[in-house]
Amino acid sequence: MNDVKDLLGRALDQTAVPDPDPTADLARGRALLRRRRRNTLCGAAAAVLVLGAVPMVVSTFSAGVAAPGAARGSSAAGTSMPAVAMVAYLGKQPQGYTVKRVPQGWVIEESSLSALVIAPEGGVPAPAPPTDPAARRVQQLKERARAHGPAQGSADSFDGKLVVLATSNDAKPARNGEKVSVDGQPGYLVSEDGDQRLTYRSAARWVDIQAPASLRWSAPDIVRFAAGITVSKRAEDTQG
Amino acid sequence: MHRSTCDQEFSAFVRDRRTQFVHAARLLTAGDAHRAEDLVQIALARLYVAWPRVRGNPVAYVHRIIVNAHIDETRRPRWRREQSVSELPESVSATGSPGDGDDDVWAALAALPPRMRAAVMLRHWLDLSVEESAELLGCTPGTVKSQTAKAITRLRGLLDGPGPVPPQPRIPAAAFERTNR
Protein backbone atom coordinates (compact mmCIF):
# COMPACT_ATOMS: atom_id res chain seq x y z
CA MET A 1 0.00 0.00 0.00
CA ASN A 2 2.40 2.59 -1.23
CA ASP A 3 0.00 5.21 -2.41
CA VAL A 4 -3.26 5.80 -0.63
CA LYS A 5 -4.66 7.85 -3.48
CA ASP A 6 -4.06 5.05 -5.95
CA LEU A 7 -5.73 2.63 -3.60
CA LEU A 8 -8.81 4.80 -3.19
CA GLY A 9 -8.90 5.50 -6.91
CA ARG A 10 -8.77 1.80 -7.65
CA ALA A 11 -11.86 1.22 -5.55
CA LEU A 12 -13.68 4.12 -7.15
CA ASP A 13 -12.77 3.03 -10.67
CA GLN A 14 -14.99 0.02 -10.25
CA THR A 15 -18.03 2.04 -9.20
CA ALA A 16 -20.43 3.23 -11.83
CA VAL A 17 -21.48 6.86 -11.52
CA PRO A 18 -24.20 8.06 -13.91
CA ASP A 19 -23.53 11.06 -16.10
CA PRO A 20 -24.31 14.17 -14.09
CA ASP A 21 -27.67 15.67 -14.94
CA PRO A 22 -28.30 18.90 -13.03
CA THR A 23 -32.07 18.81 -13.60
CA ALA A 24 -32.92 16.88 -10.46
CA ASP A 25 -30.44 18.84 -8.32
CA LEU A 26 -31.86 22.07 -9.65
CA ALA A 27 -35.39 20.94 -8.75
CA ARG A 28 -34.33 19.92 -5.24
CA GLY A 29 -32.52 23.21 -4.77
CA ARG A 30 -35.55 25.21 -5.87
CA ALA A 31 -37.80 23.16 -3.58
CA LEU A 32 -35.49 23.79 -0.63
CA LEU A 33 -35.40 27.51 -1.41
CA ARG A 34 -39.20 27.61 -1.51
CA ARG A 35 -39.43 25.79 1.83
CA ARG A 36 -36.95 28.16 3.43
CA ARG A 37 -38.84 31.20 2.20
CA ARG A 38 -42.16 29.71 3.36
CA ASN A 39 -40.70 28.86 6.78
CA THR A 40 -39.37 32.38 7.10
CA LEU A 41 -42.84 33.74 6.44
CA CYS A 42 -44.41 31.22 8.84
CA GLY A 43 -41.86 32.15 11.50
CA ALA A 44 -42.71 35.80 11.17
CA ALA A 45 -46.42 35.00 11.39
CA ALA A 46 -45.85 32.80 14.45
CA ALA A 47 -43.91 35.60 16.13
CA VAL A 48 -46.81 37.94 15.59
CA LEU A 49 -49.19 35.35 17.08
CA VAL A 50 -46.93 34.75 20.09
CA LEU A 51 -46.62 38.47 20.75
CA GLY A 52 -50.38 38.73 20.58
CA ALA A 53 -50.78 35.83 23.01
CA VAL A 54 -48.44 37.21 25.68
CA PRO A 55 -51.00 39.44 27.39
CA MET A 56 -53.43 36.51 27.57
CA VAL A 57 -50.82 34.20 29.13
CA VAL A 58 -49.84 36.86 31.65
CA SER A 59 -53.43 37.39 32.68
CA THR A 60 -53.97 33.63 33.02
CA PHE A 61 -50.99 33.24 35.34
CA SER A 62 -51.86 36.30 37.39
CA ALA A 63 -55.30 34.79 37.97
CA GLY A 64 -53.65 31.64 39.33
CA VAL A 65 -55.47 29.22 37.06
CA ALA A 66 -52.47 27.60 35.39
CA ALA A 67 -53.03 23.90 34.86
CA PRO A 68 -50.87 21.76 37.13
CA GLY A 69 -48.13 19.63 35.69
CA ALA A 70 -48.02 20.21 32.00
CA ALA A 71 -48.85 23.58 30.53
CA ARG A 72 -45.95 25.97 30.60
CA GLY A 73 -46.49 28.30 27.72
CA SER A 74 -45.61 27.87 24.10
CA SER A 75 -43.20 25.22 23.02
CA ALA A 76 -40.00 25.48 21.06
CA ALA A 77 -41.76 24.11 18.00
CA GLY A 78 -44.24 26.94 18.07
CA THR A 79 -47.26 24.59 18.27
CA SER A 80 -50.29 25.16 20.41
CA MET A 81 -49.59 22.01 22.43
CA PRO A 82 -47.79 22.64 25.70
CA ALA A 83 -44.34 21.23 26.31
CA VAL A 84 -44.15 18.00 28.28
CA ALA A 85 -43.37 18.95 31.87
CA MET A 86 -40.42 17.63 33.84
CA VAL A 87 -40.89 15.80 37.11
CA ALA A 88 -38.40 14.57 39.67
CA TYR A 89 -37.12 11.08 39.02
CA LEU A 90 -37.66 8.94 42.10
CA GLY A 91 -36.91 5.46 40.76
CA LYS A 92 -33.77 3.42 40.85
CA GLN A 93 -30.86 5.27 39.33
CA PRO A 94 -29.56 3.77 36.10
CA GLN A 95 -26.02 2.55 35.76
CA GLY A 96 -23.64 4.96 34.12
CA TYR A 97 -25.85 7.99 34.67
CA THR A 98 -27.65 9.75 37.52
CA VAL A 99 -30.98 11.32 36.62
CA LYS A 100 -32.72 14.10 38.55
CA ARG A 101 -35.63 14.84 36.24
CA VAL A 102 -37.59 13.02 33.54
CA PRO A 103 -40.49 14.09 31.32
CA GLN A 104 -43.84 13.52 32.93
CA GLY A 105 -45.29 10.18 31.83
CA TRP A 106 -41.96 8.96 30.48
CA VAL A 107 -39.94 6.08 31.87
CA ILE A 108 -36.37 4.89 31.65
CA GLU A 109 -36.58 2.30 28.92
CA GLU A 110 -32.98 1.27 28.97
CA SER A 111 -29.99 2.09 31.05
CA SER A 112 -26.61 0.68 30.30
CA LEU A 113 -23.09 1.94 30.66
CA SER A 114 -23.28 3.22 27.11
CA ALA A 115 -26.73 4.76 26.77
CA LEU A 116 -29.60 6.16 28.76
CA VAL A 117 -32.90 5.89 26.89
CA ILE A 118 -36.07 7.50 28.20
CA ALA A 119 -39.33 6.87 26.35
CA PRO A 120 -43.05 7.50 26.76
CA GLU A 121 -44.71 4.93 28.97
CA GLY A 122 -46.45 2.54 26.59
CA GLY A 123 -44.10 3.23 23.70
CA VAL A 124 -43.54 5.86 21.04
CA PRO A 125 -46.68 6.56 19.02
CA ALA A 126 -46.33 6.11 15.25
CA PRO A 127 -45.97 9.45 13.44
CA ALA A 128 -48.60 10.53 10.95
CA PRO A 129 -47.35 10.53 7.34
CA PRO A 130 -46.59 14.07 6.12
CA THR A 131 -48.91 15.59 3.57
CA ASP A 132 -46.37 17.94 2.04
CA PRO A 133 -44.63 16.26 -0.95
CA ALA A 134 -41.26 17.71 0.03
CA ALA A 135 -41.62 16.41 3.59
CA ARG A 136 -42.66 13.03 2.21
CA ARG A 137 -39.50 12.96 0.11
CA VAL A 138 -37.36 13.70 3.18
CA GLN A 139 -39.11 10.93 5.08
CA GLN A 140 -38.54 8.51 2.21
CA LEU A 141 -34.83 9.33 2.23
CA LYS A 142 -34.66 8.76 5.95
CA GLU A 143 -36.56 5.51 5.73
CA ARG A 144 -34.22 4.35 3.04
CA ALA A 145 -31.29 5.29 5.24
CA ARG A 146 -32.84 3.31 8.06
CA ALA A 147 -33.49 0.30 5.88
CA HIS A 148 -30.75 -1.71 7.56
CA GLY A 149 -31.40 -0.33 11.02
CA PRO A 150 -34.03 -0.91 13.63
CA ALA A 151 -37.69 -0.38 12.84
CA GLN A 152 -39.06 2.97 13.88
CA GLY A 153 -40.89 2.74 17.18
CA SER A 154 -39.26 -0.55 18.15
CA ALA A 155 -37.38 -0.98 21.38
CA ASP A 156 -34.19 -0.99 19.35
CA SER A 157 -34.79 2.43 17.87
CA PHE A 158 -33.87 5.83 19.30
CA ASP A 159 -36.58 7.53 17.26
CA GLY A 160 -38.96 9.61 19.35
CA LYS A 161 -37.01 8.97 22.53
CA LEU A 162 -34.94 11.04 24.89
CA VAL A 163 -31.40 9.69 24.65
CA VAL A 164 -28.24 10.51 26.57
CA LEU A 165 -24.87 9.34 25.27
CA ALA A 166 -21.41 10.12 26.56
CA THR A 167 -18.69 10.54 23.97
CA SER A 168 -15.00 9.99 24.30
CA ASN A 169 -12.57 12.53 25.69
CA ASP A 170 -10.98 13.22 22.33
CA ALA A 171 -14.22 13.58 20.41
CA LYS A 172 -14.51 16.96 18.76
CA PRO A 173 -18.13 17.98 18.60
CA ALA A 174 -19.38 20.17 15.80
CA ARG A 175 -19.50 23.61 17.33
CA ASN A 176 -22.52 24.79 15.48
CA GLY A 177 -26.00 25.69 16.53
CA GLU A 178 -27.17 27.81 19.41
CA LYS A 179 -24.60 28.32 22.16
CA VAL A 180 -25.92 27.44 25.60
CA SER A 181 -24.48 26.94 29.04
CA VAL A 182 -25.09 23.79 31.06
CA ASP A 183 -23.95 24.27 34.65
CA GLY A 184 -21.44 26.81 33.40
CA GLN A 185 -20.05 24.45 30.78
CA PRO A 186 -20.28 25.15 27.03
CA GLY A 187 -22.97 23.51 24.96
CA TYR A 188 -24.35 23.65 21.44
CA LEU A 189 -27.98 23.11 20.57
CA VAL A 190 -29.02 22.07 17.07
CA SER A 191 -32.60 21.71 15.93
CA GLU A 192 -33.58 19.65 12.94
CA ASP A 193 -37.00 18.41 11.87
CA GLY A 194 -38.29 19.41 15.29
CA ASP A 195 -35.86 17.13 17.10
CA GLN A 196 -33.13 18.80 19.07
CA ARG A 197 -29.63 17.70 19.91
CA LEU A 198 -27.64 19.22 22.72
CA THR A 199 -23.91 18.58 22.87
CA TYR A 200 -22.28 19.87 26.01
CA ARG A 201 -19.21 19.48 28.12
CA SER A 202 -19.62 17.59 31.36
CA ALA A 203 -16.58 17.02 33.53
CA ALA A 204 -13.90 15.62 31.22
CA ARG A 205 -16.10 14.52 28.33
CA TRP A 206 -18.75 15.60 25.88
CA VAL A 207 -22.32 14.43 26.25
CA ASP A 208 -24.98 14.18 23.55
CA ILE A 209 -28.67 14.53 24.36
CA GLN A 210 -31.35 13.91 21.76
CA ALA A 211 -34.70 15.46 22.65
CA PRO A 212 -37.50 14.39 20.30
CA ALA A 213 -39.96 16.86 18.83
CA SER A 214 -42.79 15.21 20.77
CA LEU A 215 -41.46 16.76 24.00
CA ARG A 216 -41.88 20.25 22.50
CA TRP A 217 -39.06 21.41 24.76
CA SER A 218 -37.49 24.82 24.48
CA ALA A 219 -33.74 25.38 24.81
CA PRO A 220 -34.00 26.15 28.57
CA ASP A 221 -35.99 22.92 29.03
CA ILE A 222 -33.26 20.80 27.47
CA VAL A 223 -30.56 22.64 29.38
CA ARG A 224 -32.50 22.04 32.62
CA PHE A 225 -32.81 18.34 31.83
CA ALA A 226 -29.08 18.18 31.01
CA ALA A 227 -28.22 19.91 34.27
CA GLY A 228 -29.96 17.05 36.07
CA ILE A 229 -27.83 14.40 34.37
CA THR A 230 -24.57 13.25 35.92
CA VAL A 231 -22.37 10.97 33.85
CA SER A 232 -20.45 8.60 36.06
CA LYS A 233 -16.89 7.58 35.39
CA ARG A 234 -18.19 4.12 34.63
CA ALA A 235 -20.18 5.31 31.63
CA GLU A 236 -18.65 4.09 28.41
CA ASP A 237 -17.81 6.14 25.36
CA THR A 238 -20.24 5.71 22.54
CA GLN A 239 -18.22 7.26 19.80
CA GLY A 240 -14.69 8.29 19.06
CA MET B 1 -28.26 38.53 -8.98
CA HIS B 2 -31.01 37.15 -11.17
CA ARG B 3 -32.20 33.61 -10.40
CA SER B 4 -32.00 32.45 -14.00
CA THR B 5 -28.32 33.38 -14.07
CA CYS B 6 -27.86 31.47 -10.83
CA ASP B 7 -29.63 28.47 -12.34
CA GLN B 8 -27.36 28.47 -15.37
CA GLU B 9 -24.21 28.77 -13.30
CA PHE B 10 -25.43 26.15 -10.83
CA SER B 11 -26.31 23.71 -13.63
CA ALA B 12 -22.93 24.12 -15.27
CA PHE B 13 -21.21 23.61 -11.94
CA VAL B 14 -23.18 20.44 -11.20
CA ARG B 15 -22.44 19.07 -14.66
CA ASP B 16 -18.73 19.67 -14.15
CA ARG B 17 -18.31 18.58 -10.57
CA ARG B 18 -21.04 16.20 -9.50
CA THR B 19 -19.09 13.03 -10.25
CA GLN B 20 -16.20 14.25 -8.10
CA PHE B 21 -18.55 14.92 -5.22
CA VAL B 22 -20.11 11.48 -5.54
CA HIS B 23 -16.66 9.91 -5.43
CA ALA B 24 -15.71 11.86 -2.32
CA ALA B 25 -19.00 10.92 -0.68
CA ARG B 26 -18.53 7.26 -1.56
CA LEU B 27 -15.16 7.28 0.16
CA LEU B 28 -16.72 8.89 3.21
CA THR B 29 -19.46 6.29 3.33
CA ALA B 30 -17.07 3.42 2.64
CA GLY B 31 -18.70 2.58 -0.66
CA ASP B 32 -22.36 2.97 0.28
CA ALA B 33 -23.78 4.35 -2.97
CA HIS B 34 -27.19 5.26 -1.52
CA ARG B 35 -25.82 7.22 1.42
CA ALA B 36 -23.25 8.88 -0.83
CA GLU B 37 -25.98 9.98 -3.22
CA ASP B 38 -28.05 11.29 -0.31
CA LEU B 39 -25.09 13.34 0.94
CA VAL B 40 -24.48 14.83 -2.49
CA GLN B 41 -28.16 15.62 -2.98
CA ILE B 42 -28.30 17.37 0.40
CA ALA B 43 -25.14 19.34 -0.34
CA LEU B 44 -26.19 20.45 -3.81
CA ALA B 45 -29.66 21.50 -2.66
CA ARG B 46 -28.10 23.67 0.03
CA LEU B 47 -25.58 24.96 -2.45
CA TYR B 48 -28.39 26.13 -4.73
CA VAL B 49 -29.92 28.13 -1.89
CA ALA B 50 -26.56 29.65 -0.99
CA TRP B 51 -25.33 30.08 -4.58
CA PRO B 52 -25.41 33.90 -4.73
CA ARG B 53 -23.33 33.97 -1.55
CA VAL B 54 -20.81 31.17 -2.20
CA ARG B 55 -20.46 31.12 -5.96
CA GLY B 56 -16.91 32.38 -5.54
CA ASN B 57 -15.80 29.07 -4.01
CA PRO B 58 -18.61 26.56 -4.30
CA VAL B 59 -16.37 23.48 -4.23
CA ALA B 60 -15.19 24.14 -0.68
CA TYR B 61 -18.77 24.84 0.36
CA VAL B 62 -20.00 21.50 -1.00
CA HIS B 63 -17.12 19.62 0.56
CA ARG B 64 -17.89 21.22 3.90
CA ILE B 65 -21.56 20.24 3.73
CA ILE B 66 -20.84 16.69 2.63
CA VAL B 67 -18.29 16.13 5.40
CA ASN B 68 -20.42 17.76 8.08
CA ALA B 69 -23.58 15.92 7.01
CA HIS B 70 -21.69 12.65 7.01
CA ILE B 71 -20.20 13.18 10.46
CA ASP B 72 -23.41 14.63 11.81
CA GLU B 73 -25.55 11.69 10.82
CA THR B 74 -23.10 9.23 12.29
CA ARG B 75 -23.11 11.19 15.54
CA ARG B 76 -26.83 11.48 15.73
CA PRO B 77 -28.22 8.50 17.62
CA ARG B 78 -31.32 7.93 15.55
CA TRP B 79 -29.37 8.04 12.34
CA ARG B 80 -26.53 5.91 13.52
CA ARG B 81 -26.19 3.26 10.91
CA GLU B 82 -22.75 1.88 11.49
CA GLN B 83 -22.91 -1.83 11.01
CA SER B 84 -20.65 -2.90 13.80
CA VAL B 85 -19.26 -6.31 14.35
CA SER B 86 -16.82 -7.57 16.89
CA GLU B 87 -14.55 -8.78 14.10
CA LEU B 88 -14.04 -7.67 10.54
CA PRO B 89 -15.50 -9.87 7.85
CA GLU B 90 -13.23 -12.71 6.84
CA SER B 91 -13.18 -11.38 3.30
CA VAL B 92 -10.77 -8.66 4.28
CA SER B 93 -7.91 -11.03 4.57
CA ALA B 94 -9.15 -14.53 3.94
CA THR B 95 -10.22 -14.30 0.35
CA GLY B 96 -7.62 -13.81 -2.32
CA SER B 97 -4.45 -11.95 -1.63
CA PRO B 98 -4.51 -9.52 1.25
CA GLY B 99 -5.36 -6.09 0.00
CA ASP B 100 -6.35 -7.44 -3.36
CA GLY B 101 -9.73 -6.38 -4.69
CA ASP B 102 -11.95 -3.40 -4.13
CA ASP B 103 -14.19 -5.05 -1.56
CA ASP B 104 -11.17 -5.21 0.67
CA VAL B 105 -10.62 -1.48 0.34
CA TRP B 106 -14.23 -0.69 1.13
CA ALA B 107 -14.20 -3.08 4.10
CA ALA B 108 -11.00 -1.52 5.39
CA LEU B 109 -12.43 1.98 5.03
CA ALA B 110 -15.60 0.87 6.80
CA ALA B 111 -13.48 -0.24 9.74
CA LEU B 112 -12.32 3.35 10.30
CA PRO B 113 -14.33 5.76 12.48
CA PRO B 114 -16.16 8.39 10.40
CA ARG B 115 -13.86 11.29 11.26
CA MET B 116 -10.78 9.24 10.55
CA ARG B 117 -12.23 8.24 7.18
CA ALA B 118 -13.00 11.87 6.48
CA ALA B 119 -9.43 12.86 7.30
CA VAL B 120 -8.08 10.29 4.85
CA MET B 121 -10.47 11.41 2.14
CA LEU B 122 -9.66 15.09 2.56
CA ARG B 123 -5.91 14.67 2.77
CA HIS B 124 -5.27 11.82 0.35
CA TRP B 125 -8.11 12.02 -2.15
CA LEU B 126 -8.87 15.72 -2.35
CA ASP B 127 -5.25 16.64 -1.59
CA LEU B 128 -6.29 19.33 0.85
CA SER B 129 -3.68 20.73 3.20
CA VAL B 130 -3.67 19.90 6.89
CA GLU B 131 -4.98 23.36 7.66
CA GLU B 132 -7.78 23.16 5.10
CA SER B 133 -8.77 19.72 6.35
CA ALA B 134 -8.75 20.93 9.94
CA GLU B 135 -11.03 23.80 9.05
CA LEU B 136 -13.48 21.49 7.29
CA LEU B 137 -13.46 19.02 10.16
CA GLY B 138 -13.64 21.66 12.85
CA CYS B 139 -10.57 20.43 14.68
CA THR B 140 -6.93 21.33 15.08
CA PRO B 141 -4.25 20.61 12.46
CA GLY B 142 -2.59 18.32 14.99
CA THR B 143 -5.74 16.23 15.22
CA VAL B 144 -5.88 15.94 11.44
CA LYS B 145 -2.29 14.74 11.36
CA SER B 146 -2.80 12.18 14.09
CA GLN B 147 -6.12 10.95 12.69
CA THR B 148 -4.64 10.57 9.22
CA ALA B 149 -1.57 8.76 10.52
CA LYS B 150 -3.68 6.39 12.60
CA ALA B 151 -5.96 5.76 9.64
CA ILE B 152 -3.09 4.92 7.33
CA THR B 153 -1.60 2.59 9.93
CA ARG B 154 -4.94 0.84 10.31
CA LEU B 155 -5.48 0.57 6.59
CA ARG B 156 -2.00 -0.83 6.16
CA GLY B 157 -2.62 -3.38 8.89
CA LEU B 158 -5.90 -4.42 7.33
CA LEU B 159 -4.80 -4.57 3.73
CA ASP B 160 -1.15 -5.55 3.90
CA GLY B 161 -1.05 -7.41 7.18
CA PRO B 162 -0.42 -11.15 7.41
CA GLY B 163 -3.67 -11.97 9.13
CA PRO B 164 -6.92 -10.49 10.33
CA VAL B 165 -6.24 -7.50 12.54
CA PRO B 166 -9.67 -6.28 13.47
CA PRO B 167 -9.56 -3.04 15.37
CA GLN B 168 -11.73 -3.00 18.43
CA PRO B 169 -14.73 -0.76 17.90
CA ARG B 170 -14.74 2.30 20.10
CA ILE B 171 -18.44 1.95 20.65
CA PRO B 172 -19.18 -0.79 23.11
CA ALA B 173 -21.13 -3.77 21.92
CA ALA B 174 -24.19 -2.82 23.95
CA ALA B 175 -24.53 0.41 22.00
CA PHE B 176 -24.50 -1.50 18.75
CA GLU B 177 -27.21 -3.95 19.58
CA ARG B 178 -29.97 -1.51 18.78
CA THR B 179 -28.61 -0.62 15.36
CA ASN B 180 -27.25 -3.95 14.37
CA ARG B 181 -30.27 -5.81 13.14
Image (cartoon, coloured by chain):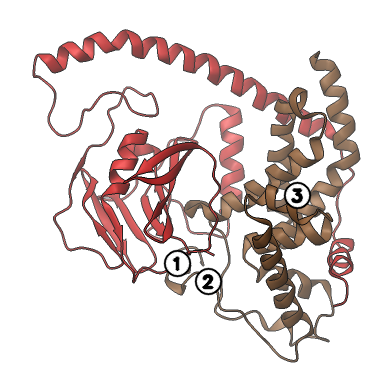
Q: Which of B166 and A156 is in front in this view?
A: B166
Q: Is mark 3 on a helix, strand or loop?
A: helix
Disc 2 sits on a residue from what chain? B
Residue A145 in the image: above or below residue B62: below
Q: Classify residue A89 as left or right of residue B65.
A: left
Q: Is mark 2 on a helix, strand or loop?
A: loop
Chain shown in brown: B
- Disc 2 to disc 1, how far (Cα)? 7 Å
Q: Colour of chain A?
A: red
Corner quadrant of residue A103? top left
Mark in the foreground, 1 or 3: 3
Q: Is residue B107 visible?
A: no
Q: Is mark 1 on a helix, strand or loop?
A: loop
- Residue to which mark 1 is pinned: A237
- Residue to which mark 2 is pinned: B170
What residue is at 27 percent from the left and 68 percent from the top? A95
Disc 3 sits on a residue from what chain? B
Corner quadrant of residue B105? bottom right
Residue A41 in percent (x, y) is at 53, 14
